Image (cartoon, rainbow, N blue to C red):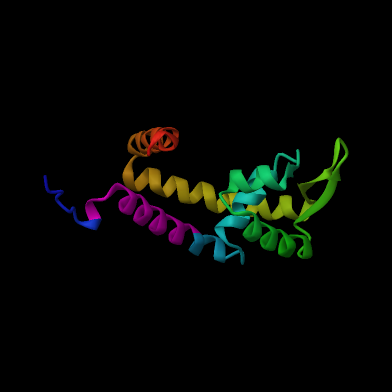
Amino acid sequence: MSITKEKITDNLAYVLAQAHREVHLKFEQRLRLEGVQVEHWRILDVLSDEKGRSMGDLAGIVLMNHPALTKMLDKMVANGLIHRSLDQNDQRKVLVFITNSGLELHQRLNTHAVEFHSQFNSNIGSDKVERLKRLLNEIIDEAPHLN
């Protein structure tokens, strides 16, 4: 039995990657007005609840590997956007917290994020955007079960 090779543009992984790239680049263009990358916004958005996160938890939530996250956090500490401190319950853990300057930047960045989301809703339709998010969440939930 022969396997028919599909075009790369028909491959789900490729289409997802292409969609991510296009959306990421457009959002990054907006955030560049503030001099930051999308990953900065993700980090500040997660930390904006002011609860603090361990490095491991933060890496998982913001979709970054530990070395890249550490490098970015070092820059954010130097810019006064976040600070690190030892976890009082477990001295082996370092927690990351947002600063007041980080909260101010987050508010500005969040304005861009809300506008970007609104533009998607206007261009594509809020019903389609919600359906797409539901489908993507199903893919995310199913992915660990794939071999």
Q: Look at 75% across and 38% down and name the residue there.
A: 51
User: Which quarter of the rendered picture does the C terminus lie within?
Assistant: top left
Magenta stretch bounds = 9-27
| Depth order, front residue of 27/53 | 53
The question of residue 21 being in magenta is answered with: yes
Name of the residue lying farthest toward the left: 1
| Residue drawn at (41%, 33%) of the image | 145
52 relative to 86 in the view: left or right: left
Q: Can you give x and y, in whole percent of width and height, for residue 34 in the image?
A: 61, 64
> Compared to 3, does 141 lie above or below?
above
Question: Looking at this rendering, what residue extends furthest in the front direction?
Answer: 1
Q: Is residue 9 left or right of residue 43?
A: left
Query: In the image, residue 59 lies at what x, y percent?
Result: 63, 48
**Residue 71 or residue 3, whichever sits in front:** 3
- Label the magenta part by its dominant secondary structure: helix
Please report the residue visible at 68 percent of the width from the left and 63 percent of the height from the top: 71
127 lies above or below 6:
above
Residue appearing at x 70%, y 45% in the figure: 47
Q: How many marks?
A: 0
Residue 8 to residue 88: above or below: below
Q: Quarter of the image holding residue 26?
A: bottom left
- Horizontal side of 71 relative to 13 (left or right) equals right
Name which quarter of the figure residue 69 lies in: bottom right
Q: Is residue 79 left or right of residue 131?
A: right
